[in-house]
Amino acid sequence: MEQQEAVKQALALVSRAQIAMLGTNGNDGYPHVKAMINVEHEDLNTVWFITNTSSRRTTQLLRDPRACVYFVDFDQWMGLMLVGEVEVLQDAESKQRLWREGFEKYYPLGVTDPDYSVFRFRAHWGNFYHALSNVTFEI
C-alpha cells in the first residue's frame, strides 16, 4: 500500500471510530492504556478528548506529555497508531468546543466544572496497518 492511500484510509478510520486507546507513561515507568471517547479530530494532526482533571491520566500527562493514540476497526482488521504529545487544557474555549449534551452526567457543574479537562493530542507520526500492509508516515 502506498503512503497516500494509507493516510486516506487512516483518516477514514479516525473519522468513524467512537473509541480510541490513549497510551501514556505511568509514574511506575510502565505504559498505561485507557479507552477514551473520540470526541473530535482535525485530520490526523490533532485528536481531542475530555477527561476528569482529577484523573490519573491527567497527572501522568502533566508530568510527561508523550503519548500515543490507537484506533482499531476489528471487522476490517485495521489499525492506526499516532505518536505525539498531549496538552492538558482548562481554557473556556477548549472546554466549550468539546462540551456535548449529556456530559453533565460526568461533570455536574457543566462546562465550567473544575473537574472537566480537555486533552489535545498532536501527532508527530503514524503507523497504519491493513491487509498485511504496514505503513509508517510523518504528520
Image (cartoon, rainbow, N blue to C red):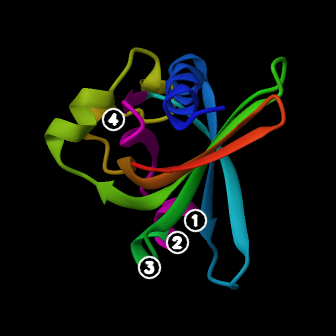
Mark sitting earlier along the chain (3/1):
1
Q: Which label sits in the foreground, 3 or 1?
A: 3
The amino acid marked with disc number 4 is Leu
Asked if residue 8 lies left or right of residue 46, the reply is right
- Image quadrant where one finds the N terminus: top right
**Separation (CA) of disc 4 from disc 1:** 21 Å
Point out which mark residue 109 bears. 4
Left/right of residue 45 with respect to residue 84 in the rendered view:
left
Name the residue: 37% across, 30% down: 43
> Is 38 one of the magenta-colored residues?
no
Relative to 16, say whether 77 is above or below: below
Q: Which label lies toward us, 1 or 2? A: 2
Residue nearest the viewer, comparing 111 with 27: 27
What residue does disc 1 label? 56
Image coords of residue 65 (percent x, y): 43, 69
User: What amino acid is found at the position of numbered circle 2 in the picture?
Assistant: Gln
- Residue linked to disc 2: 60
Type of amino acid under label 3:
Arg
Q: CA distance from mark 1 to mark 2?
A: 6 Å
Q: Secondary structure at mark 3?
A: helix
Badge nearest the viewer, 3 or 4: 3
